[in-house]
Image (cartoon, grey):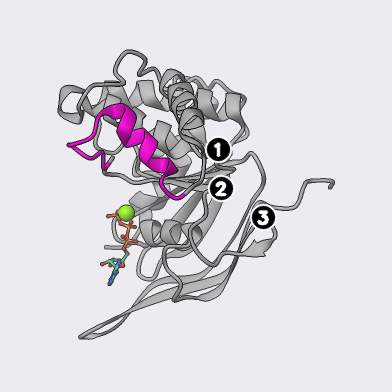
Amino acid sequence: MTSAAPLLRIRSVSKSFELPKGTLDVLEDIGLDVAPGEFVCIVGASGCGKSTLLRLIAGLEAQYTGSIDYDGAPVTGPELSRGMIFQEHRLFPWLTVEDNIRLAFSATDVPRHEQKARVQEQIDRVGLTGFEAAWPHQISGGMAQRAAIARALINRPKLLLLDEPLGALDALTRLKLQQELQRLWLDVGITMVMVTHDIEEAVFLADRIVVLDARPGRIRRIVPVPLPHPRERTEAAFNSIKHDVLTDFADSPG
Ligand SMILES: Nc1ncnc2c1ncn2[C@@H]1O[C@H](COP(=O)(O)OP(=O)(O)OP(=O)(O)O)[C@@H](O)[C@H]1O
Ligand SMILES: [Mg+2]
């Protein structure tokens, strides 16, 4: 095989938290490679460690065993080339849409005039043109999530980590944003690692679906989704993969 070196290489990662009552083992022996340009979805029961794993990859948490390499070097802290989108969109209510997005430049030395143009580029990309000066309370949940996506794209990350980015949205807005995320991924070619509770969303978007077991979080299996994009949710092949993944959750004892 002549495939490129992985952009992300996770080896034997285990993570525990020390609690007053004892040690909580959250992740155990996680191993995963993500190729450049790949879209990987992580699914698993609530509390199985999905957000914790994303935080380790982002460099927000240093206490773990095993290794995480990004672009050939160990992850030692957050970096602009690894963007993160949290489940809560976290727009600041006292800043306009434009200024919320511009915040992503605060750790950079990008000159102000260039900031303006780059903010506008991302606003246009996510379809918020005309809402630059709106306040967060004046826009819908889906628009706020678009603004959060624009903010994460500002520094042109190579890897985007998405923690249930669409979890708080109604079903129709969710379908629309799934399509937009897919278009973004196809157009821009960013590598994506996305946590979701929604198996259908994972089958719609992912090249591979990582199914985590709970307590401690372990990789149960990795399901490839070898269907061409854009995917048709009513297709037999789509539904057979969806049902296959769903059985992992129906089976689990208790
Ligand atoms: N900072 C922390 N200190 C102690 N325990 C933590 C901490 N962060 C997470 N945990 C625990 O680790 C476990 C995994 O949490 P995590 O948020 O990664 O789960 P998750 O899979 O993202 O769940 P959900 O699907 O509900 O978002 C939980 O039991 C949680 O209580
Ligand atoms: Mg979580």
Label 3 vs label 1: CA separation? 15 Å
Placement of 93 over or under 227, stated as above or below: below
Q: Is residue 239 visible?
A: no
Q: Amino acid at mark 3?
A: Asp
Point out the stretch of residues depicted in magenta. 90-107
Label 2 vs label 1: CA separation? 7 Å
Residue closest to the eye, 99 or 159 = 99
Q: Is residue 109 magenta?
A: no
Q: Quadrant of ligand 1?
A: bottom left
**SS class, disc 3:** loop
Q: Amino acid at mark 2?
A: Ser
* For residue 190, side relative to residue 90 (left or right): right
Question: Which picture quadrant has residue 191?
Answer: top right
Question: Which picture quadrant has residue 31?
Answer: bottom right
Placement of 81 over or under 214, stated as above or below: above
Residue at the image position 64 percent from the left and 39 percent from the top: 37
Which label belongs to residue 251? none
Q: Is residue 91 magenta?
A: yes
Placement of 235 over or under 115, stated as above or below: above
The first of marks 3 and 1 along the sequence is 3
Residue closest to the eye, 125 or 54 = 125
CB-based contact (under 8 Å), mark 3 and mark 2: yes
Residue at the farthest right position: 2
Which residue is the site of mark 1? 156
Which residue is the site of mark 2? 81
Instruction: Give the percent coordinates (x, y) of residue 154.
Output: 48, 35
Which label belongs to residue 71? 3
